[in-house]
């Protein structure tokens, strides 16, 4: 009888650990599909001008009614965060057809020695900075 109780306890522990693992992985997948989480990096073009960087790109948003705004925040003299925000008017009924939206913002900074990070709706966003030669 002790052997059966030991096996049942071991089975219960293993089943609980397995269930918890499925909950963690499955919950993250469901959450990622229900929010504006970007999986692939967004390409952001950095076009230098005199004393400034014009930063632009496109994002795929879940609905044509979603709006997009962009601005840069200077974190330090050599570090900037590109902040992207999305919103939708709750009074408007809209289809859930994905649409690309263009954004542009400016960072006033020297030509070299700076770094960029990006956030979308407060969450870190993977990105690739594509440096464009001045005047192109």
Image: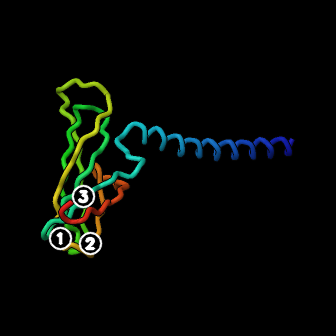
Query: Disc 2 and disc 3: Cα gap in Å?
Result: 13 Å
Expressed as whole percent of the image width and height from the top left, the position of residue 59 reads 29, 44
Instruction: Give residue 76's mark.
Output: none
Q: Earlier in the sequence, mark 1 or mark 2?
A: 1
* Cβ–Cβ under 8 Å for marks 1 and 2: yes
According to the picture, the residue beneath numbered tag 3 turns out to be: 82
Name which residue lies at 30% across and 38% down: 61
Q: Secondary structure at mark 3?
A: strand
According to the picture, the residue beneath numbered tag 2 turns out to be: 114
Q: Secondary structure at mark 1?
A: loop
According to the picture, the residue beneath numbered tag 1 turns out to be: 109
Q: Closer to us: mark 2 or mark 3?
A: 2
Q: Earlier in the sequence, mark 1 or mark 3?
A: 3
Q: Residues within 10 Å of mark 2 (few under 14, many from 20)?
A: few
Q: Quadrant of the C terminus?
A: bottom left
Q: Is residue 27 left or right of residue 44?
A: right
Q: Along the line of sight, which residue is nearer the eye, 5 or 26?
A: 26
Q: Secondary structure at mark 2?
A: loop
Expressed as whole percent of the image width and height from the top left, the position of residue 27 reads 49, 41
Q: Earlier in the sequence, mark 2 or mark 3?
A: 3
User: Within the image, what quadrant is residue 113 found in?
Assistant: bottom left
Name which residue lies at 42% across and 47% down: 39
Against 107, is 27 above or below?
Answer: above
User: Within the image, what quadrant is residue 96 found in?
Assistant: top left
* Cβ–Cβ under 8 Å for marks 2 and 3: no
Name which residue lies at 29% across and 55% down: 44
Against 2, is 72 above or below?
Answer: below
Q: Quadrant of the N terminus?
A: top right
Query: Disc 1 and disc 2: Cα gap in Å?
Result: 8 Å
């Amino acid at each position: 009888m002790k052997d059966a109780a030991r096996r049942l306890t071991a089975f219960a522990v293993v089943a609980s650990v397995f269930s918890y693992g499925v909950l963690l992985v499955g919950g993250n997948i469901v959450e990622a599909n229900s929010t504006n989480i970007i999986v692939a990096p967004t390409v952001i073009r950095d076009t230098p001008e005199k004393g400034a960087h014009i930063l632009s790109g496109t994002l795929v948003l879940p609905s044509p009614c979603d709006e997009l705004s962009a601005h840069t925040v200077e974190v330090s003299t050599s570090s900037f965060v590109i902040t992207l925000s999305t919103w939708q008017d709750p009074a408007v009924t809209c289809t859930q057809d994905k649409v690309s939206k263009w954004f542009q913002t400016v960072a006033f900074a020297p030509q070299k020695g700076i770094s960029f990070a990006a956030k979308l709706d407060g969450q870190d966003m993977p990105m690739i900075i594509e440096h464009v030669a001045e005047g192109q």
